[in-house]
Every structure is written in structure tokens, then in C-alpha cells.
Image: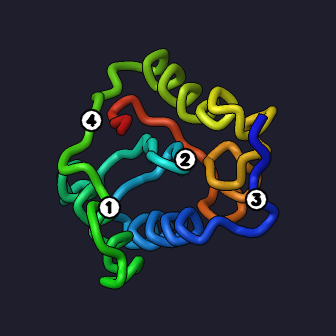
Amino acid sequence: MRALKSTPWPKAELMMDVLLHYREQMRYVLHEFVIMPDHLHLLLTPGADISLERAMQLIKGGFSYRLGKAKTGLIWQESFTNHRIRDEHDYERHAGYIRMNPVRARLVERPEMYPYSSASARFERTFGRRTTNAESRAI
């Protein structure tokens, strides 16, 4: 089991800020997420007036902009993988996969111990109540 650094992980904190910012602007409903050291998983429903592609542009662009121009090199892969949630069972399967990602990566013993995830208590305080929606998309 790899131990998490005791100090906050600045890039993960930055991504949390970006996710909250666009969520507050109602660009999407954020159901589940996990920010891993080298990738990100999201379960979200785009807002009524926004496509999934545009929501991802906002998230990726907002993070890159906030990270600053001092960062050189590739920050994001050019595309993303998405899956349309078919039903409640599919939703729960993807939500569980996202919550368990830090455990499978041996970063923590239990999902709620990982601070950069919707499974943590911090998510409830910062992002509000979880919701479910069969029209969500996993990324």
C-alpha cells in the first residue's frame, strides 16, 4: 500500500477547484469522481445546454489554464473515453469502479480514505449531496 503524502497534492486540489467551479455554474451534475496521480474518472450529467465534449473542454481547459503556462509539455491526452449509462445497474457498476480506483491502486485501504474522490467525506461537504441519474455518462 502506497502512503498518501501528508500534505495536500496541489494538482489534485486544483482539479477539485475546477470541478467545483463548473459544477457551481451548472455546466454539469457531478455524481462521482476520482483524481488519481496519472488519470481522472468522472461520472457526470452535462447541463441541458452543453454537450459532453464541451463539458470536458471546460474541465481540461480550466485545469490547464489554472495550472499556468509555465507547465510545458502535454497535460492531457487529446481525447477521452466515454460510456453512456444505460440503467441504474450500469450506473452503480461505474460508480463503484470510480470509488474503488484508489483502493485497487493500493493508495488507500478504503475508498472513503482517499481525499480526491467523491467517496470521501470531503466530497459531501464540498460538492453537496450525491444524486443518481440513468442518463449520466462515465468518463
Label 3, residues with CA under 10 Å away: few <14, some 14-19, many ≥20: few
Residue 8 seen in this snapshot:
yes
For residue 94, the mark is none
Which residue does the numbered mark 4 point to in the structure image?
A: 81
Label 1, residues with CA under 10 Å away: few <14, some 14-19, many ≥20: few
Horizontal side of 37 relative to 60 (left or right) equals: right
How far from the left and from the top, in percent, is residue 68? 36, 82
Q: CA distance from mark 3 to mark 1?
A: 22 Å
Which residue does the numbered mark 3 point to in the structure image?
A: 5
Which residue does the numbered mark 1 point to in the structure image?
A: 75
Which residue does the numbered mark 2 point to in the structure image?
A: 36
Q: CA distance from mark 4 to mark 2?
A: 16 Å
Number of numbered labels in the structure image: 4
The residue type indicated by label 4 comes to Thr
The residue type indicated by label 3 comes to Lys
Label 1 sits on a secondary structure element that is loop
Q: Relative to residue 117, is residue 103 depicted above or below?
A: above
